[in-house]
Image (tube, rainbow, N blue to C red):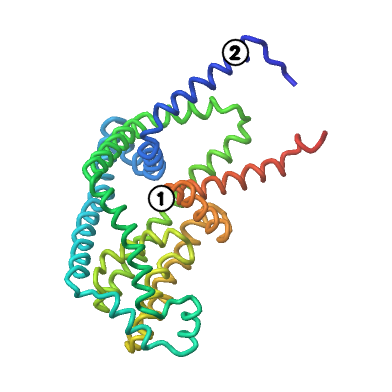
């Protein structure tokens, strides 16, 4: 094994220290940098196509690609967020005015439940309206404190968000314009042989594209279908619940059902049998079918990851990294499988 000299070891130490210092400096914008890189990878085929159309003019094609992303992604998300805030405020006003009364809804649900279900709830002391109200009051106090704290920081949070989006778009422009040169430098700097670099880099790019495109398309489809069902059934705040279902659908197999399932049960126990049965059938056959059909095609097929690995890595990633984890988790899982496959098939590690 090659022995490094003192100057080489010193340089490697310096390299490690300045790298850590640079990462520390960039850490306040970690989310913006992460999504800038993700968007650059996902929309790279669009940029390459624009590069061909523009006659190999990197700056012009990068600006056009950035404008298209603003129109296709940033602007729709902003409009949905504004509508979501308005609808959340309207639902809150309905709760304050008594149009939505959770105590009455709870009592109706209790009255419509079969005896075996009531017995099960009694074991957990959940059939008493007074007991439940006390628990809900305690929870509401904590939520109110958190909401008040958040409300004080709304201006700062909005400013931070705008700064992050600006940094992301600024970085994205340069990644489009100089991405090929930058990726070539990174690739040459990685101390691995070419037969290892090629599959690992390819896996990294493929998984990011498949995960982002697949999960976002599934989330949009399930959120839209769930929101339309709630609007048809006259459930308050259909857009609000549609967005919540879209976010939860990032969790494979179980996501959107967390919302429409309890609503369907509430319809059943309160005597709205056709609405409950219809929502269950619609949820399983339409909303669930989107997840069962599209996700394996868009995510599992390209990443070559089993469904259970996609599920566990997505949940684990989101638990550790928040919303960013639905990309980070599957990427780490794919690289884990790819590196172990390379190790298992590399004779140089097993011939000694």
Indicate which disc residue 250 carries: none
Q: Is residue 109 above or below residue 191?
A: below
Residue at the disc numbered 1? 323
Q: Which of these two is toward me, 67 or 167?
A: 167
Q: Is residue 197 above or below residue 117?
A: above
Q: Residue at x 34, y 83 (%)?
A: 267
Q: Position of residue 317 (x, y in %)?
A: 50, 50
Q: Which of these two is toward me, 65 or 20?
A: 20
Q: Residue at x 52, y 20 (%)?
A: 17
Q: Is residue 57 above or below residue 344?
A: above
Q: CA gap, disc 2 to disc 1?
A: 39 Å
Q: Secondary structure at mark 1?
A: helix
Which corner quadrant holds the N terminus?
top right
Residue at the disc numbered 2? 10
- Relative placement, left or right, of 29 versus 338 is left
Q: Residues within 10 Å of mark 1 (few under 14, many from 20)?
A: some
């Amino acid at each position: 094994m090659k022995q490094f000299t003192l100057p080489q070891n010193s340089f490697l130490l310096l390299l490690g220290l300045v790298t850590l210092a640079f990462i520390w400096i960039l850490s306040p914008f970690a989310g913006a940098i992460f999504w800038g890189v993700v968007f650059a990878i996902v929309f790279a085929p669009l940029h390459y196509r624009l590069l061909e159309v523009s006659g190999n003019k990197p700056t012009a094609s990068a600006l056009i690609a950035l404008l298209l992303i603003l129109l296709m992604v940033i602007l729709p998300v902003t409009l949905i967020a504004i509508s979501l805030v308005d609808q959340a405020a309207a639902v809150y006003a309905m709760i304050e005015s008594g149009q939505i009364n959770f105590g009455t809804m709870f009592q109706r649900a209790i009255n419509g439940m079969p005896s075996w279900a009531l017995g099960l709830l009694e074991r957990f002391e959940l059939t008493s309206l007074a007991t439940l109200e006390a628990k809900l009051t305690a929870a509401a106090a904590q939520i109110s404190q958190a909401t008040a704290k958040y409300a004080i920081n709304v201006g700062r949070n909005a400013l931070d968000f705008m700064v992050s989006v600006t940094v992301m778009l600024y970085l994205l422009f340069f990644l489009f314009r100089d991405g090929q040169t930058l990726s070539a430098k990174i690739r040459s700097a990685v101390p691995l042989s070419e037969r290892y670099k090629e599959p690992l880099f390819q896996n990294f790019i493929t998984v990011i594209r498949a995960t982002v495109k697949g999960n976002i398309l599934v989330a949009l489809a399930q959120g839209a279908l769930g929101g339309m069902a709630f609007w048809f059934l006259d459930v308050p705040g259909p857009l609000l619940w549609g967005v919540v279902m879209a976010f939860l659908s990032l969790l494979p197999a179980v996501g959107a059902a967390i919302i429409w399932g309890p609503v369907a049960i509430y319809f059943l126990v309160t005597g709205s049998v056709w609405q409950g049965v219809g929502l269950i059938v619609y949820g399983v056959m339409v909303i669930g079918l989107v997840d069962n059909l599209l996700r394996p095609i868009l995510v599992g097929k390209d990443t070559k990851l089993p469904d259970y690995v996609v599920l566990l890595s997505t949940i684990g990633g989101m638990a550790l990294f928040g919303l960013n984890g639905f990309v980070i988790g599957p990427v780490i899982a794919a690289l884990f499988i790819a590196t172990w496959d390379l190790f298992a098939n590399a004779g140089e590690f097993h011939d000694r």
